[in-house]
Amino acid sequence: MTAIYRSAAGAAAVRDRYDALLARWPVPSERRTLGTRLGETFAVVSGPETAPPVVALQGSGGTAAHWLPDIATLAGRLRVYAVDAPGEPGRTVEARPPLASPAYAEWLDDVLDELELPRAAFLGTSLGGWWALDHALRRPERVGALALVNPSGIGRRRTAPLLKFAAYSLLGGWGRRRSLAMVAKGSPADPARRAVGEFTLATFEHFKPRLEAIPEFGVERLHELVMPVQAHFGARDVLIDQRAAAAKLREALPDADVRLAEDAGHFLPGWAESVVEFLA
């Protein structure tokens, strides 16, 4: 087990704020605790029971609450299973197996089994996109389609912002706000996104993010994806070279629906309706 919080009090504070944010969920939902070989996994389930199933995976430092701004759109025509990932804030087990291991694909096998889903589409953003890609490559028979929003693992990770974030981390609340402003540049500031941003700031006061390098998928590996793929990239993403990522994915999968937003950053707006049309 990995200690992902700086203190027990900090962990409790994050979970209390998380519960308060989940209370603002704008559509009917069910909260589930799923048994997996890594440990208990928390999920929020929304949308019509007969709609196409979609497992939604947030990125590092994220929780199911990070779908709050878009869940009303997604759950209108999809059955959305928003899952807290292992080793991230939220209410899932704190285990952090190596990313290159088969552990996360096995964990998602268990999630699908617990949800009684032989097969589902996957929606992943940032590191959640990496988990979705990893599972699709290891278990193509269980992934009906992939929708990716600024995924990790395709484009090169930018190192200069990481150095700035490390310096800002020494400057307390001001530094955390400055880091978030860099990442969120170009993102709309509606009330739900502001609430999620405030939660993110509060989380990183107590949460210890992953330091492990994220493995990158080569063109040849991406070419092995057999399911329909839609991918949204923000050209101004400060964390990942998403312009190069979009070009790489187009090379690997000429039939994929690859979209590059020139004025958007890591928190990419305006993708939800396109993803619903694609997956529904």
Image: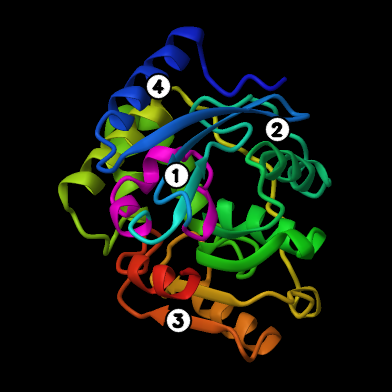
Amino acid on which the number 2 mark rests in the picture = Arg
Tag 1–tag 4 contact (CB < 8 Å): no
The residue tagged 2 is: 96
Left or right of 256 in this view: 171: left
Tell me which segment is drawn in magenta.
51-74
Amino acid on which the number 3 mark rests in the picture = Arg
Tag 1–tag 3 contact (CB < 8 Å): no
Q: Residue at x 38, y 44 (%)?
A: 66
Within the magenta stretch, is there residue 81?
A: no
Camera-side residue of 192 and 52: 52
Amino acid on which the number 4 mark rests in the picture = Val
Q: Which mark is residue 165?
A: 1
Q: Position of residue 102 (x, y in %)?
A: 83, 46
Q: Position of residue 72 (x, y in %)?
A: 29, 52
The residue tagged 3 is: 259
Look at the numbered disc 1 and give the secondary structure of its residue: helix
Look at the numbered disc 4 and give the secondary structure of its residue: helix
Left or right of 119 in this view: 91: left
- Please say which color scheme the image uses: rainbow
Cα distance in 3D space between marks 3 and 4: 34 Å
Q: Residue at x 72, y 30 (%)?
A: 36
Front: mark 2 or 1:
2
